[in-house]
Amino acid sequence: MRSNDEIRNSIEAFSARELTELEDSLSDNWYLEKLNIGQKIAATRKEGNFLVIAGPGTGKTHTLAYRVLHMIKTGTDLSKVVVITFTRKAGNELKYRINQLMPNTELGFVGTFHGFANHISQMNGKQSPISKFRLLDAEDDRQVHSLVMTDYRGFSKPIRAGRIQKLISYCVNTDMTPQEYIKKFDLRNLMDDGDAIEAYRKVYERYKVEHMLANYDDMILKISHFMDHKENRLPLPYKYLMIDEYQDTNKMQLDFIKKLNIPNVMAIGDDFQGIYSFRGADHKIILNFYRDFEDAKMIKLTRNYRSVPEIVNRVNQTVEASKLGYQKVLISAKDMSGYVEVVPGNTLESHRDFVISKIKEKPEESHALIYRYNKHRTVFEKALINEGIDYAVYGGVRLLERKHIKDVLAFLMVYLNRRDVVSYNRILTIYPGIGPKTAKRLMKYELKDTDRLNDEKTAFVGQVRDILTTTVNKDELLSLVIKLYMSIYDLIESDYYTVSDVKDDFQLLTDLLQSYESLENFIINLILDPVVDLKKGKNPKVILTTIHSAKGLEFENVYYFHSHDWYKNYDLEQTEEDRRLFYVGISRAKNNLYVFDHTDVPRPFESILKDFEKIDMASVSDDSSDPEEANDVETEKDEKKEQSNVIKVDFGSGKRK
Ligand SMILES: Nc1ncnc2c1ncn2[C@@H]1O[C@H](COP(=O)(O)OP(=O)(O)OP(=O)(O)O)[C@@H](O)[C@H]1O
């Protein structure tokens, strides 16, 4: 099998003459002046399939925005352009950057995979296979599992609904069987239940169809199948597809893209930034682009505009230390120096004091604390509050995903649709002691069969019934629901949110509802288009974030904490994913990078850190400190100096499958 670098080394570079000709042909396009030659080529290639492989900070998002600008300037009908981003946040960032270049620009579609599946569904109206389905977000989907599992007797031992949900979703996304999943992750305690889970999966799928329910995976799958039936669906009007963060694509998403049959595909990504394997992403998909899309060409960007040379060299070194045979050479375009330090210390408390003092030294600069698990942020959060330093949290539980908010939304959904069994079950089972079985009976008899309940539960069910049958406007309805919820809040288990947190969140929800015309619109928008929680501060300079949520962002100062405490079997794959996480985390830093060396961090990280510390700063190449020297265009003279940034690939004659 060829290694990743062998695949890349088979790449044929543009000749110096070809590059000069290309550069000349683009010289009239003054609006591209700010791009380097690699970026220019990516921005101006319209027809054909292209893979842009680019390291962190090399301007992938920047180039995408300019590509749209170039399309506008050259008269492309933008309604034929689709951009798929990995998260809604990334989609919004791209829209923002495009609108900075050209205000009021509207594309055919910009958003996530399931957002696009939903878009196609809406285009097809009643013909869509999911037109009448109630869409489930992840939390609702888990409720469905809870409901189905109450009647399923096949498992040899109790299994949590969340665990089954994760397992089945992974299998759907990767086309794997539960048995294969159990083997892959060496889940010994599920070894005997592989067949039972397979059988359960069928029951669960049937339940969703019978109750007209579709989760995010179903949206993509059902629309993918629908695309096979030309006779039923409207032809897609799109000519250009761009996909960002292509290294995080999984098999189901790849199949979906191929079914769309959009003639010109540009995928953008960094094969070393793949950090979503736990959700079924397969970072090898990026290397097989040439097999999946006809006559693909590759464009490589290696000039980093974000970080100082000291940091870029550490980033390069992290890639080189990989055991999977990668070699990447990023070149810093910055003509200034920065600082890198591995900070020793045993406790999170000593690290906290260090970080707080650094933040106080430079309050006007941006500071990001990057950690792997949310629990690590608590010690910093408290200190920041005590010091009166404003901050924001990325990657925590967002407003609309918080349990109390979801509980209240469920009331509103049942008010609109009494047949919404998922929400109905949720609101009844909020009350401790009312389980799914009792809830089922109560639903069946329209909340009247309370004989077997004690007085408190009967009173609660009576209040629910009153709310559901009253006629009030949307704002009054929400206020009634909140009042009932707060009256039983003491009974509801929550070790995470204080009463005052919950009240603040409800106030935000009340304000949000007021800005909508109708309850129906509010619900549809909240499920498909969740609002980001902007409650804490407006533009705080200090950000607490998980590595996954830091993706795509940049900060002047980065404090990187690593940790992985629950893995027992650390294999090469896992260690390499950790290395990629480390790479994503440290490459967010523009000027100063501090890496924290916990002595209690388990060993796999130690080896990554050792590789990192080994770097001899004296060996930093001169090429990288001089942005003018580090030219992106490969000329014959430069041949030995750096690999070309702009590369044409002869990928053979792979056909779109
Ligand atoms: N040609 C250029 N000239 C000057 N600045 C640039 C250029 N290209 C990109 N930049 C700047 O470099 C920074 C990184 O760009 P961008 O966020 O688009 O990188 P990226 O490749 O998407 O990064 P990552 O993969 O790490 O998220 C941004 O501040 C951007 O404005």
Image (spheres, helix red, strand yellow):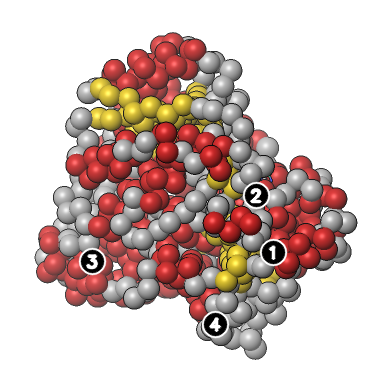
Q: Is residue 159 left or right of residue 303?
A: left
The quadrant in which residue 552 appears is top right
Looking at the figure, which quarter contains the N terminus? Answer: bottom left
User: Closer to the N terminus: mark 4 or mark 1?
Assistant: 1
Q: Nearer the viewer, residue 23 or 225?
A: 23
Seen in the picture, residue 309 relative to 153 is either above or below; the reply is above
Measure the alpha-carbon separation of dots 1 and 2: 12 Å
Is residue 249 at all visible to an observer of this figure? yes
Measure the alpha-carbon separation of dots 2 and 3: 45 Å
Measure the alpha-carbon separation of dots 4 and 3: 33 Å
Query: Mark 1 sits on what residue?
Result: 16
Instruction: Check disc 2 and give the amino acid type.
Output: Asn
Seen in the picture, residue 611 relative to 74 is either above or below; the reply is above
Q: Secondary structure at mark 4?
A: loop
User: Closer to the N terminus: mark 4 or mark 3?
Assistant: 3
Of the two numbered discs 4 and 1 in the rendering, the one whose residue sits closer to the viewer: 1
Give the residue drawn at x 61%, y 52%: 60
- Quarter of the displayed picture in which ligand 1 can be seen: top right
> x%, y% of residue 604?
22, 45
Query: Mark 3 sits on what residue?
Result: 184
Measure the alpha-carbon separation of dots 2 and 4: 29 Å
Instruction: Check disc 4 and give the amino acid type.
Output: Gly
Q: Secondary structure at mark 3?
A: helix
Give the residue drawn at x 38%, y 27%: 341
Query: Mark 4 sits on what residue?
Result: 652
Instruction: Check disc 1 and give the amino acid type.
Output: Ala
